[in-house]
Image (cartoon, rainbow, N blue to C red):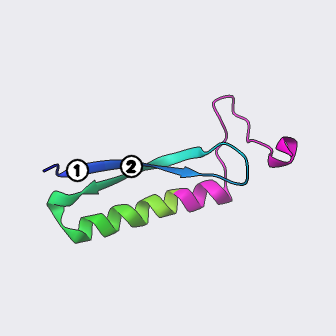
Amino acid sequence: MAAEVKMPVRLQMGDLPPYEVGTLTFDLSDGPDSFTTNLAAALRVAANEIERPTGNDEGEVPDAAAHG
């Protein structure tokens, strides 16, 4: 049985393509407290990305209005 499972965290609004904001890692060997800590950290990263987008590879923040 695997001791670690990684899952991508993606945000999607409307018809826009999903935007990957990070990875949620389940380290099951450390017990439930580690799982809770990793989940809280992933949710903080997602919330920060929504509030203060870091932009894409070109340094631009996608404009939702431009996509209809």
Which image quadrant is residue 61 in?
top right
- Amino acid type of the residue tagged 2 in the rendering: Met
> Residue at label 1?
4
The stretch of residues the image draws in magenta is 46-68
x and y, in percent, of residue 25 in the image: 33, 52
x and y, in percent, of residue 16 in the image: 71, 45
**Depth check, front residue: 50 or 14:** 14
Mark drawn on residue 25: none
Query: Does residue 55 belong to the magenta stretch?
Result: yes
Residue drawn at point x = 22 percent, y = 50 percent: 4
Q: How many marks?
A: 2
Alpha carbons under labels 1 and 2: distance apart: 10 Å
**Dot 1 and dot 2 residues touching (CB under 8 Å):** no
Which image quadrant is residue 36 in?
bottom left
Mark drawn on residue 7: 2
Q: Is residue 9 left or right of residue 34?
A: right
- Amino acid type of the residue tagged 1 in the rendering: Glu
